[in-house]
Image (cartoon, rainbow, N blue to C red):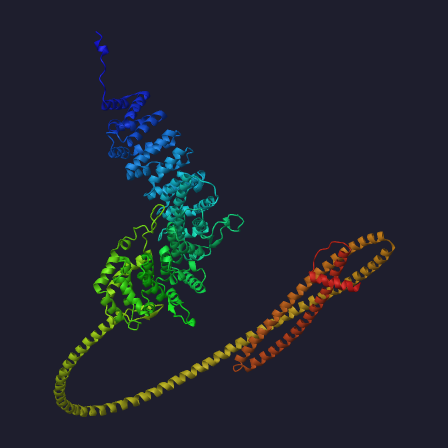
Amino acid sequence: MFSTITTAPAKQSVSETIAVLSGRLSTATLLEDRRAAILGLRSFAKQYPASVASGALRSLIGSLSRDGEDVDTVKVVLETLLMLFSPNQDSPEASEEIALWLADEFTQRQENITLLLDFLDTADFYSRLYSLQLLAAILSARTERTEECILVAPMGIPRLVAALDDRREAIRDEAITLLTDLTPASIDIQKLVAFEKGFERVFSIISEEGGLVDGARVVEDCLILLANLLRLNSSNQSMFREMGFIAQLGRLLRAAYMGNESGEEVAQWAEAQRNRNIYALLAVIRLFLVAGAVGTHQNQVAFLGDRVLENTLQLAFAHEVELPIKSEALVACADMIRGNPRLQERFAGLEVPSPLADLVSNGHDPHTNGVPNVFVIDGLLDIILAENTVQAFDMRMAACTCLKAYFYEHAEVRRHFLTRAIHGHKMKADELTNVFTTLLQPLPEAAAADPYRYWFAAVLMLHLIHENPETKALAMAVTEGDEASGEEVVTSIQTIAAHLLSSVAKSEDTRVVIGYLMLLLCWLFEDVDGVNDFLGEFTNLQGLIQAAVENPNGDVIVQGLSAMLAGVVYEFSTKDSPVPRATVREMIISRMGRDRYVDKLSKLRAHPFMRDFEVLPQKLMDGGLDPKLPDVFLDDTFVEFFKDNFSRVLRAIDREPGLEISVVTNGVQKGISRELVDSLRAHVAEKDRALQDAEVAKSSLASQLGQEQADHRRAKENGLAELARANAAAEQLRAQLTTKDRLLKNAEALAATANEQLSREKASHQQTNALYQQTKASYDRTKASHEQTRTSYEQVKAAHDQLKAENQGIKTEVARLQSVNGGLQRSHEEEMNALQKQMDALRRSTEIDAERVRRRSEAEKADFKASISRLEVDLMKANKAKSVAEEALARANKAWAAAEEALEKANKASAEGLSGAQKKSSEAEEGLAEARAQLETKEEERRATQNELDDLLIVFSDLEEKVTRYKDRLKALGETVSDGEDDDEEGDDDEEDDEDE
C-alpha cells in the first residue's frame, strides 16, 4: 500500500538538469522563476561550460534584454556568462573553442554588444564592472570583430572613456584594461578616445594615484594606454602637443627624480613599481621621437621648451636612480636631439650632476645634494670611459648613443668636439676621459680589465670622422713624439695601426681589436692621404695581412675585418703611395690569395653578429651577480657601412693595379678616375675606327675623281664646238640689231623735239596761273590785316576805359581809407590823453588812501574795457579796409596784366600788317603809344596806392601794439581779458611797457 511512497525518485543527470533549467529560463513568466533558473545554470557554468552554453546561451543573452531593469538578475546573468568564458581547468568540457563560440554569438549580432554597452550607463556597481569584464573577454577572443562592433555602436567609445571617471577603482581599472586592449592597432579608436578627453582623464588618474613615485600598477596601466593612443598616430601626437600635455610629462619626470632624492625608505615592491612606472613614461616619450616621422622635429622642439629634455637628463644622472632607468633616459635624450641642429647645439650647454662625484654627507655643499655639476658632454664621457663595471655596460652604451646623436649630421659639432679633444690631448688634461688619449696612449693593463673603454673610444672617433674629410684631416694631423727631444714623430693613423697589431700579437680582448679595425676602415675608406699615411710604415700592411691569415685566436670577425682593411688599402692606394699599388696587390695575392680573401669577407658577412645585427639585443644580458661581458662587438653605423660597401671591397682585389680610383675630397680630385680611363680608351678606339673608314672613303673618292675628270674633258671639247657655232649666229644677229637701233634713235629724236615744245607751252600756262594766285593771295592778306588791326585798336581802347574806371575806384577807396586813418589817429590821441590823465589820477589816489585806489582801479578797469572794445571795433574796421584795399590792388594788377597782353597782341598785329597797310599801321602805332602812356600812368597810381597801403599797415601795427599794452595793464590789475594776439607779441609788449614805466 505504501510502496510507492518509499520509493526514491530517479536521479537526474547533469545534462537533463541543464536542459530543464534552460527550458524554465526561456518559458517562465515570473521574474523570480527566471532568476532561479539562472542561478541553477550558474552553478554548472564553471564545470560544464559547453552544456550550459549550448542549451541556454541565447536565453541568457535574451534575459539581459528582457530583465535589464532588474539589477539582481543582470548581475547573475553576467556572472554566468563570465564563468562560461573562464571555466575550471579540470572541467571535462573545457576548451578554447568555447570562448570563440561565445564571442561569435555576441559579435555576430550588433545589438548584443550594444546591450552590454548600455549597462555602462547604469549606476549599479556589478552591472558596470561585469559588462566591462565581459567586453574584455569577447575582445580577447574576437578582436577585430569586437572593435568593429564597439566602433559602430551608438556612443560606444564615449561610454568606455567615461568609465575612467568612475570613483570606484575596480570599474576604473577595468575600463583602463579594456581601453588598453582596444587601442593598440585601430587608428580610428585611438582618435576617438583622444577626442573624448582621454589624455586629460589618464593624467588625472595618474595624479590621483600619486604620480610615478607613489603610484601603483594602475599608473603603469595608464601609461601603457597612453602609449597605445600615441604610437605612430601623428594626429593624436599633434593634439597632445598642442593641448600642453608635454609639460605634464616634464613635471612627472621632475617629480620622479626629486622623489628619488628624498632618501626615504621604500619597500622593495614599491621601488620595483616605481621603476616600472618611470620606464613606461620614458617609453611614452620615445614614441614622439621616431626617426623620420612627420611630427618628430616639432616634438623635439616642444620637449626642449617644456624642459622634458632637461628633466630626462637630470633623471639619467641622478645617483639614486637604478641603472636600467638611467640607460633608458639617456636613450630618450639621444632621440630628443638627433637630427635637430638647434637642439644639438644647445645640448652641450646643459649641466648635470657629476656621475663620478661621491655624495657629500654634510649637506653644506652649494650644489644639489652635494654633487657638483658638470657639462653634459663631460658627464657622458665620464660614464663611457671612466665607468668600468660590467653592470654599467647598458648605461655606457646609452651614453655612447647620446653622444652619437649629438654628432649626428652636424659637421660643426663634430669639428668642435674633435678640436677640444685634440687640445686636451696635447695639454695632457682629462687623460682618463679623453678620446684621443685613450686611443693613442692605451694603458697596458687596462685593456684586460675594461676592453670596452677602448671599444667605446674607437666608436666615438669613428662617428667623428665618418664621411667627413675635414675631421679626418684634423685627426690625421695629430702626432706622437717630440722631434725636438730626438723622438720619432709618428702620425695618429700609424699609432693606432701599431696598437692594433700589438693587440693582435698579444691576443688581447677581441673587442679592442675590432674597435681599432672599425675605426681604421671608416677612416681610410675613400681617403687617399690616409691610405698613404698608413702605408708610410711598411710593417703595417704586413701585420694586417698576417692578422687576416694567421690570427692565433681564429676569430672570424677579426680575420674578416683585417682582410677588408687590406682590401680598402689596395682600393685607394696609388702608384705614388709609399708602398706602390702594384706592390700592395702582390703582397695580398702572394700571402693571402684571392680565394682566401673572398672567403674571409664572405664569412664575416654571414657571421650572426653581422648578419643578424638588427635583431640581436645590443645590451647586457641578465647574468645574476657575476655577469659576463655582453656579446656586443660591432657598431650600428659600421654595420651599415660594411653592408653598403661589401661588394665594392670584395671586387677590389680583381682590379688591375693600373686602374686607380678617383676620389674627390673637399672639391679636389685625388687619384685617376677608372671611368675616365675607360672613357678615353673607348674614345681612342672610336677614333681608330673613324680613321679606317676615312681611308676607305679616300680611295673610293680618288677613283671617282679620275672618272669625273675624264668626263669633264669630253664635256669641255663638246662645249667648245657648240660655242663656235653660237658665236657665228651671234654675229649675224648683232648686225641686224645695229640697223634696228639706228632707226629707233631717229624716231626717239623726233619724239623728244615734240615733247620739248609741249613742255614749254605747259610751263608758260603754269606761270600765268601762279601769277594770278599770287595776286589774289596778296589781296586777301591785305584785307585780313586791315580787319585784325581794327580789332586790336578796339581791344586797346576797351582796356584803356577799364583801367580808367578802376583807377577812379582806387582813388576813391584811397581817399576813404585816408579819412578812416585820420579818424583812427585822432581817436587814438584822445584815448592816449585820457589814459594819461587816468594814470596820473591813479598814482595820486594811491598815495592818499588804499581804499580809494581800489575803487578808482575798478573804475579804470571799466574804462579800459570800453576803450579796448572801441579799439577792437576800429581795428576790425581797419582790417576790413585793408582787405578791400588789397582786393583793389589785386584788380589793378590783373588789369595791368590784361593791358600788357593786349599790348603784345597789338604789337604782333602791327608787325604782321606792316607791309600791307602803312597808313593803318601809323594810326595803330599812335594808339599804341597812347595806350602805353596810359599804362604808365596807371602803374604810377598803383605804386602810390601800394605806398598808402603800406602806411596803413604800419598804423595798424601801432594800433595793435597799443591794444596789447592795454590788455597787459588790465591783466596786471587782475582783470580777465580775451586772448587776441600771439604769445611772442605779448612778450614784446611787456618789455616795452617796462621800458615806458
Residue 203 is situated, as x and y percent measured from the top left of the image, at 43, 41
Q: Eyeballing the image, is 473 above or below 312?
A: below
**Residue depicted at x 59% and y 79%:** 925
**Residue depicted at x 64% and y 65%:** 887
Which residue is more in the foreground, 182 or 63?
A: 182
Q: Eyeballing the image, is 565 above or below 714?
A: above
Which residue is more in the foreground, 991 or 814?
A: 991
Q: Is residue 339 visible?
A: no
Horizontal side of residue 897 vs 575, given as left or right: right
Quarter of the rendering occupied by the N terminus: top left
Residue 701 is situated, as x and y percent measured from the top left of the image, at 15, 81
Horizontal side of residue 182 vs 860, given as left or right: left
Which residue is more in the foreground, 932 or 282?
A: 282
Residue situated furthest right in the rendering: 848
Q: In which quarter of the image is residue 997?
A: bottom right
Q: In which quarter of the image is residue 565?
A: bottom left
Residue 76 is situated, as x and y percent measured from the top left of the image, at 33, 26
Residue 756 is situated, as x and y percent measured from the top left of the image, at 32, 89
Horizontal side of residue 145 vs 779, given as left or right: left
Q: Can residue 906 be seen in this view?
A: yes
Q: Eyeballing the image, is 795 above or below 922?
A: above
Which residue is more in the foreground, 571 or 885?
A: 571
Number of marks: 0
Q: In which quarter of the image is residue 863?
A: bottom right
